[in-house]
Amino acid sequence: MLRILKDLSKAVTVCSKCLVGKAVPNWSNSLALKNRLWSNLKVAPAVLQTLNTKSFTSLSNGTIRDLTNLNARSYRSVRPSGSEPERSRDERFLYRSDLKNAERIIVKLGSAVITREDECGLALGRLASIVEQVCELQSQGFQMTLITSGAVAFGKQKLRHEILMSKSVRETLSTSVTASIPNFEPRACAAAGQSGLMSLYEAMFQQYGFKTAQVLVNSRDFQNEFTSRHLTETMNELLIYNIIPIINTNDAIASPPELDKDLRGVISVKDNDSLAARIAVEMNADLLVLMSDVNGLYTSPPDVEGSRLMKTFAPKLDLRNVVFAGKSRVGLGGMESKVSAATWALDKGVSVVICNGLEYRALPNIIKGKSIGTFFTNAKHVASPVQVDAVKAKEASLNLQSLEPAQRRQIIEHIADLLIERSSDILNANKRDIVAAKRNNLSDVLVSRLELSLSKLQTLATGLRQIAASCEDTIGRVLQTTKISDNLILKKITAPIGVLLVIFESRPDCLPQVAALAISSGNGLLLKGGSEAQYSNELLFGLVREALDKVHLKEAVALANKREDIDDLLELNEYIDLVIPRGSSSLVRSIQKKSQGIPVLGHSEGICHVYVDEDVNPEMATKIVVDSKCDYPSACNSIETLLIHKSHLRSGVLEGICDELKKNEVRLYSGPLLQSMMKFCPPPAERMDKEYGDLELTLEVVDDVEMAIAHINKYGSNHTDSIVTNNRATAKRFLERVDSASVFHNASTRFADGFRYGLGAEVGISTTRIHARGPVGVEGLLTTKYVLEGAGQTVKEFTEGKYKYIHEKL
Ligand SMILES: Nc1ncnc2c1ncn2[C@@H]1O[C@H](COP(=O)(O)OP(=O)(O)O)[C@@H](O)[C@H]1O
Ligand SMILES: N[C@@H](CCC(=O)OP(=O)(O)O)C(=O)O
């Protein structure tokens, strides 16, 4: 309410300063008043949406003067004294995330979007979808204007149809269809096409309760002082009354386009891209969206091999990297014309996105800041912030690996110290996350993963100190030395992978663990945490940066916080070398699907088993099963299925285990074999490969170890599986044949963890079969490189027999 009053008082101040003495209109229509306030005074649409008719009526009676002639530009120049200075237009929309603040939006539809690929009429489906999006935004308070192409293309189809229909059957059959169609005069096509186009728009917008108005202009109209002013006034008036202007060039009487140089820095209207740019600037629009039949601007025409979509385009820096060629099947200007129109509009303070009109919900998603099409910006960075972070992390990782091991060790120890010193700050931030999570009805499983405690922080710090201690021989450790020949020595040494992207959900304790592992192994790190752990993550990230800043390398680690950032990051295969998703199986699967050429390390599911063999110590078996299920049911290494040897159905072992599980409130389900063998057993399990992640467990019976192995290899997720047996031969068989990253004998599956394995911590558990499997600590974040030390030898000298290969392992 305070904001509403503030904004209204702003409006009134401006009015009274500028328009004292003008007639007071009868504001019976509150919508019209809202639009006038908004359009002329730039009172935030969201504020106006919240005002009710009553407040308008009382406000309008005598307070507000005639606002008609006060346009948006004049408001900007008549800012009430004492108000906060606004960011300049150039600064307001530097990043996509700023687009949510746009108010006036121009959308231009190219001919290729409007007409069908088979040239048989208008593309009704996508046109209706765009109209729906425009209406959605208009009713949310954005001021929408449409620039439409397509009159010539559509008119050509109409005329062609007419020619074909007016021919006799004999004529049609005697000549080829294409040869019989003349080259139509584009002006006539435009005249024929424009009316059909407009009646369609009118019908479509009407379905959503919006009225449209047609405005046709030509290049000369912008050069003439009167027609140019009339155009602005007409547009303002239409916008005030919530009518959506639909603009095209008046092609039926258009003269040939004029050259840019005649217009001294003002773009000449030679096609609809330049028309859209010109209108956007004249109308003081915030955003111009140019919709075409391609996903945006590419480094070269999209069908050329190796051509890449440019998500962000800074004209001053990037133009030299783009090759243009060709147009769409019906377009007039081509991409080059779009880029020069967009660049011109950007220089005049209008943000521009070039995107594909076929993309589902492109407009609302652009406003939300999603990475759709090509975003034109004058930001100093060549790229969007995540790309910048990735470049910096790559640079910093090189410096990180050149540090002395002792320096890397100190950084990690410093993080461990900070975890204890700042524990109350961390726990307070974590409390804020927990409160928000509960308010948002996050599941108990997720809340338990989110929660930090002093003891968790202490364990975390201990783990970090272990990692710190291992810094001495991480990078540059010699794995193999080969004497190729005298004075020619080849060494294989450990080396960092490069830049890691770790995407994690819920658990904020991952952040310092992963950061420590990356620092120890000399890898740059990009982190993307879940929004549910936002406060905890920001605080912990701040501590990591603080420690890295001691050696001026704080940029080695960056934290991305928007969900949309993930898509952008996954395309950066030039800078990112490995992706490690940690979280739910759906998160991991979606990352695996989206990652474009960057290897993904991790596991999508944790379907772990304990098999209780015939020859067991019942007490040990019960202890292991209960710990494997109940110690931390939401962890990926807790079990989902207990396989039991058939002899225990009557030995009392199964009964004893079930009693203990029930005491721990575990809900039990039975597999199909158990159901067939027992009269009274728990309800049937939904599937045998279900990951409960909670106090739930499937029980199934097996004949012997072979059947247990087959079951695990079929339904498991190659994560962690354990056998409880006193028989060494059976255990050996199980350990050899179960195809999982971790296989245990007489131990709880909960041991599958970086800290418990003595790795200090883990970046995740890998079930993929690339270089690292199981819990991945520092070792898993290293690769190797060869270093060859010679004394001027050449291969030719070996070929010619001067030297001989020795290949001796040293
Ligand atoms: N570097 C490039 N990036 C993207 N598209 C390009 C590029 N160079 C040429 N084009 C062509 O530009 C066409 C879009 O321009 P245009 O034909 O004017 O479309 P519209 O009718 O939508 O205005 C695309 O169909 C594409 O083939
Ligand atoms: N004014 C013309 C379109 C001109 C034009 O620039 O076309 P396009 O390149 O498809 O945006 C028409 O309505 O057909």
Image (tube, grey):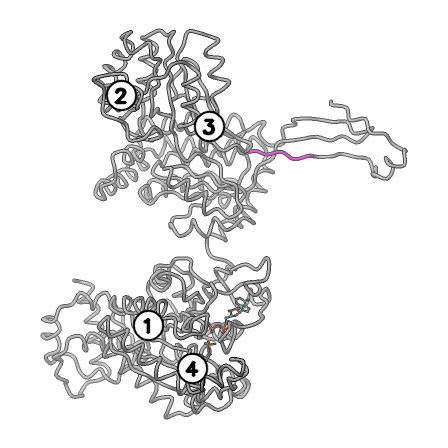
Q: Residues within 10 Å of mark 3 (few under 14, many from 20)?
A: many
What is the quadrant of residue 422 in the picture?
A: top left
For label 3, the residue is: 775
State how far apart marks 3 and 2 are (Cα). Answer: 36 Å
Question: Is the residue at mark 1 in contact range of ligand 2, meaning its CB lies under 8 Å from it?
Answer: no
Which of the labelled discs sits on residue 161, or is there none?
4
What is the quadrant of residue 663 in the picture?
A: top left
State how far apart marks 4 and 3 are (Cα). Answer: 68 Å
State how far apart marks 2 and 4 are (Cα). Answer: 71 Å
For label 2, the residue is: 675
Q: Secondary structure at mark 4?
A: helix
Instruction: Give the foreground label among 1 and 4.
Output: 4
Instruction: Give the amino acid at mark 1.
Output: Arg
State how far apart marks 1 and 4 are (Cα). Answer: 39 Å
For label 1, the residue is: 104
Instruction: Give the foreground label among 4 and 3.
Output: 4
Q: Residues within 10 Å of mark 4 (few under 14, many from 20)?
A: few
Instruction: Give the foreground label among 3 and 2.
Output: 2
| Upstream in sequence: badge 3 or badge 1 | 1
Which of the labelled discs sits on residue 325, or is there none?
none
